[in-house]
Image (tube, rainbow, N blue to C red):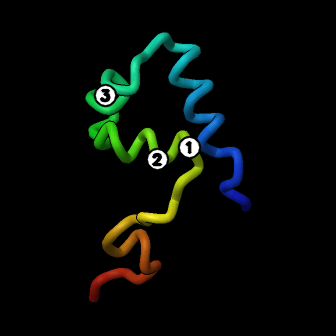
Amino acid sequence: MSIEGLGRKFQEARNARNLSLEEAARLTRIRQSRLAEIEADDFSTGAQGTAHSGRTPN
């Protein structure tokens, strides 16, 4: 599945609920700067940890 356009869908969902980026960050517990990157389809910083590597700890 392609993630292109995913940010736009996040932004549309947030706007449909009349949430500011700050409110969405508080509710999702995702940093506001990271949410802004996601909405801009900027995945260059990537995630850290097992979710990013695809490996599970033993």
Give the image quarter of residue 53.
bottom left
Q: Secondary structure at mark 2?
A: helix
Judged left or right of residue 39, residue 52 is left
Q: Position of residue 14 (x, y in %)?
A: 51, 23
Q: Position of residue 36 (x, y in %)?
A: 44, 39
- The residue depicted at 54 percent of the width and 18 percent of the height is 15
- The residue depicted at 52 percent of the width and 59 percent of the height is 43
Q: Is residue 16 above or below residue 12?
A: above
| Quarter containing the C terminus | bottom left
| Residue at which label 1 appears | 40
Q: Residue furthest bottom?
A: 58
Say how many tags the image has.
3
Q: Are marks 1 and 3 in contact (CB under 8 Å)?
A: no
Mark 3: amino acid: Leu
- The residue depicted at 58 percent of the width and 25 percent of the height is 13
Q: Nearer the viewer, mark 1 or mark 3?
A: 1
Q: Residues within 10 Å of mark 2 (few under 14, many from 20)?
A: some
Q: CA distance from mark 2 to mark 1?
A: 5 Å
Residue nearest the viewer, comparing 10 with 32 = 32
Question: Residue 27 got which mark?
Answer: 3
| Residue at which label 2 appears | 37
Q: Secondary structure at mark 1?
A: loop
